[in-house]
Image: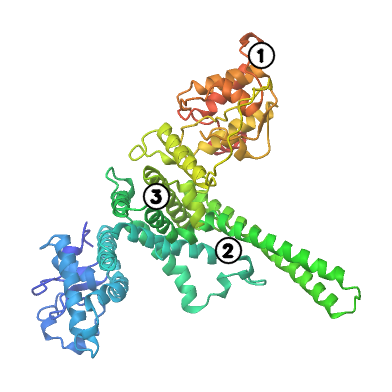
Amino acid sequence: MKQYLSLLERIITEGPAESTTTWQNKATGIIANDEEEETIFRFYECTDDDIDGMLPCLTDEELKQYPVVACGIIGKWIHLRELDDISDIFDAYYDDCLEDYKYDHGSDPDAWDRDLAQEFILTKHIQEEKERIKQSEEIMPYLTEADCKKIRDVADNYLRYARRQRHKALTKKYPRDMVLQKTFADLYLQGGAHTCLQWFRYEYDMPIRAEWKLPHTTMKETLHGEMLTYHQLEEPTIAKEALEDFDEDILLSNDRPLMQEIESNLRKRSSEADRERYLLSLLAPFRDFANAFCPKSRILDAEREIRHIGDERARWTAELEKAADSSSKEYADAKEQLHACDEAEQLMRSGIDHYNNVANRLYWYAQHGLTRSCTEEEDPDMCLNLCYWLDIMQLFARELASLALSYGFDLKELQEKSGVYLLPKVMNVDYVDYSYITSFEQARRMLEEIHNRHAADALPDPTPAKRKSRQRPTDAKTTKPVPLHTMNYTHRGRDRNKRLQAAMVLLENEKMIQVSRPDDFFDLFSGEKRKCNVRWTGTAVTLTFMLKSLLESAFVEKQRGCSVSSLCTGQFGTQPNSHYSKMTDEDRNVISLIMSLLDPDRELPKRNDEEEEGDRGGR
């Protein structure tokens, strides 16, 4: 058998066949397109002896006896690949399919009231073309592996082309000045990100509310027939295609067109109230996706309901005490209501546990998608997809934080008002994008202005008071409040929290600090003015020189008022001690290790178990 690098040129696209071909699957015959349907290719099993005049002599019924091996865009490409560029082939094929659809439905009684072009691309074409591409897989066994790869590439790229046409059709319904933001928001409202989250909820039994969890079955087990097929096949495909089609440049390019569009809309709103309403509307489409990862608003609602139940319990307890006779109707009603209060509170508390559990599991899946360390039960592609949509949402939140701050709005307050937390914890570093906000100092100053303005608005109107006589000042000493500063750790990489965690564990092991929660230690490096619940139990001289080393490092921002003295007195309630000679070698070693752990230019040391695993792998 003669070996070919490609067998595509052996396919007959026009004119008579001169000889047969022995194809990759050992079949002998010709592959040619129909005379009237140039995109439909069939395989004709025959020999060289009976090939002359064969095709023109076949009737339509006889043609149907020979299998179709390629059609649709694959057939179009095979027919025109030597004549036209791929973009011309795609355009011509799309236009032909659209014209066929208009011809088939143009005479429908209600065609006058339908946009057939929109209808074609939004509801028909892509699904029908996927079926044609699947049918065209019949040609694969006849061709070489290189040929098959070309055909798969053509199919994938045409589907992307068709989805882009669908996207253009969808954007026609958006206001012209909101196309990018509406397109982006739709990914989380009903598009790829939403579909990805829904897949995880059903696949791993994570309903939105705890009371929706079924006692003896899972959400996935309730799916049957078409719904199960949609979950297993269609949802992963939708999520994958949405990820492939998403244009990251709207957020990542230097000109950031999405933020430019949002800023243009902010400028059109003259009042502060209108601008705030507009910014809040930008958060709304992310509610379901964001609240799955940070269910703070749902937990606050549940806690508010628990307090209300507590008030109801107190009222019915008083009613129970009033009813002297335990057999009276009043006594029975009070007992029943108290029992209902207990059940309702238990439901609220189980809901809080459920929200936290779902959020932790989703972060777990996203982290496994990032590290590609999924277990056998986890789908690595879907985990990566989930991680991608989470990262994109949080990137958008940081850019929006910078833009909003430049117009006098704090993203932290916007999230609290809307109940949608794109960033669970907004830190000073999240406001600096080096475009709208160019430095940490600028961000801090603008945030202080916002908070001072709100504090002034909250004060009651001043009322005239009687002028007091001047009194002789007393000898009592007035104490000036100690400023509360924290260090601004400027490293924004993915391993930021891991580095801080390692530093905290080291200091705890050396009996130098006591921390109730890791967040308390992380707050010490947030750059915000706040009290951190970190207790220093080491020596004052070690604290002094550790803070001095950190403040002089390249990865801690220089801040006005943030000094060794202010940190010692404000955060740790001790006076700095500069007697360096009193430090032990062990203390100097601890400070050196802390600096190494927090320096983003140095690699984090591996844990012992990771080193052992690496050694085993090497052996």
On the image, the x and y values in percent for residue 582 come to 66, 11
**Structural distance between the alpha carbons of marks 3 and 2:** 26 Å
Q: What element carries label 3?
A: helix
Marked residue nearer the N-terminal end (1 or 2): 2
Dot 1: element: loop
Q: Which amino acid does label 1 sit on?
A: Thr
Q: In which quarter of the image is the N terminus?
A: bottom left
Alpha carbons under labels 1 and 2: distance apart: 53 Å
Q: Give the colouring mode of the picture.
A: rainbow
Q: Are marks 1 and 2 in contact (CB under 8 Å)?
A: no
Mark 3 = which residue?
396
> Mark 3 or mark 2, which has the lower sequence index?
2
Residue lying furthest bottom in this view? 109
Q: What element carries label 2?
A: loop
Answer few, some or many: residues within 10 Å of disc 3's Cα (few below 14, many 20 plus, some between 14 and 19): some
Residue position for label 2: 206
Residue at image position (71%, 64%) is 309
Give above or below for 263 relative to 7: above
Kindly report which numbered mark, 3 or 1, lies closer to the viewer in this rendering.
3
Give the residue at x 35% y 58%: 184
Q: Where is residue 514 in the image (x, y as percent from the top left)?
A: 69, 32
What residue would you read off at disc 1? 584
Q: Can residue 493 be seen in this view?
A: no
* Amino acid identity at mark 2: Met
Q: Quadrant of residue 47?
A: bottom left
